[in-house]
Amino acid sequence: MAGFVDFEITWRADVFGGAPQESSAASFGTMGINFRARKATSEEEWQAALARLNCELPS
Amino acid sequence: MTMDTHSPTGPSVPDLDLDSLRQAIQTEYQVVAENPDHGFHFHTGRPLTRMLGYDDAWLEGISEAAIASFAGTGNPFSMEQPGPGDRVVDVGCGAGMDSLVAAKMVGPEGHVVGVDMTPAMLAKARKAARDTGLRNVEYREGFGEALPVFDGWADLVISNGVLNLMPDKHAALGEMARVLKPGGRLQIADILVEKPVPAGAKRNIDLWTG
């Protein structure tokens, strides 16, 4: 099944600060985010997106 | 069709007691449904909608009870609004506020399905839909990892502050992909953890809910 392409985080902010009860969120650097993506229109588009992925680990 | 309403797969966090986790989450969000002024480790209600950039016009006519129990972490509509006639799935819909906003946006030709695992939230969402007078929204009980929605049904999947509560995120995202049409949109609000979470903390159910 085709997966997601065009992933994008569009917004991030502290959404837990000032809440009525203390949270563990701050200790883990927790932010609220909005993100979007699109389901590939075809298996071909999905495979092409996978082929473009290039992850290099620092030596 | 391959709609799966059976119990979803197990968690991707080893040694996490899935049933205990779900019970703890249901207990927490039952309080959010029934006593939204209780005070939580997260913000709630109309003040939260303003913090997250919801336009007050989107909320006009929507049941105040649904707004009071809103507990999102972002704004799925800030990226792009659903259009007239769209089909929308709201994963972990809670008391239904985002589903009702979407139902207003898609109009009478569109349709919205909200899915949640907490009965108290579903009861509140269904009442809110009746009180709001919207007939193009329905609420179904289910898990994000096994959505009770047909393959390729939706133009848009939204979710707000819920994916982080699902132990098997790979399964949850797979389900979101399954129910979307080719080219369908995913617009999610959730949380991002910027520091590594130790394995012991991942098994601590108190940290999942607070």
Image (cartoon, rainbow, N blue to C red):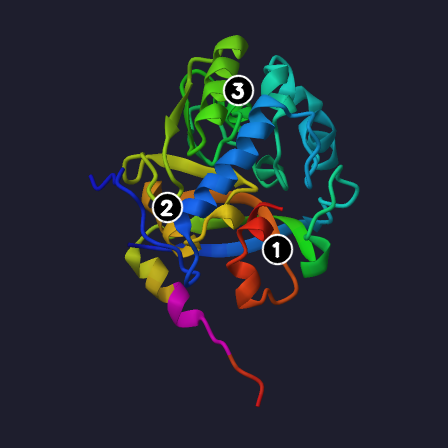
Q: Quadrant of the C terminus of chain A?
A: bottom right
- Among the two numbered marks 1 and 3 on one chain, the one whose residue lies closer to the N terminus: 3
> Which is nearer the eye, B178 or A29?
A29
* Residue B67 circle label: none
- Can you say whether B199 is above or below B107 in the image? below
Residue kind at label 1, given as amino acid type = Leu
Looking at the image, can residue B81 be seen?
no
Residue kind at label 2, given as amino acid type = Glu
Q: Residues within 10 Å of mark 2 (few under 14, many from 20)?
A: many
Q: Chain of mark 2?
A: B
* Residue B192 circle label: 1
The Cα atoms of the two marked residues, 1 and 2, are separated by 20 Å
Q: Say whether residue B33 is left or right of residue A45.
A: right
In the image, are marks 1 and 2 on the same chain?
yes
**Badge 3 is on which residue?**
B104
The quarter holding residue B197 reads bottom right
- Name the residue located 46 percent from the left edge and 17 percent from the top edge: B126
Magenta stretch encompasses residue B87: no
**Badge 2 is on which residue?**
B145
Residue kind at label 3, given as amino acid type = Lys
Which label lies toward us, 1 or 3? 1
Q: Which residues are magenta?
A: A49-55
- Name the residue located 35 percent from the left edge and 50 percent from the top edge: A41
- Among the two numbered marks 3 and 2 on one chain, the one whose residue lies closer to the N terminus: 3
Which residue of the protein is positioned furthest toward the left in this rendering?
A: B1
Q: Label 1, secondary structure: give it.
A: strand
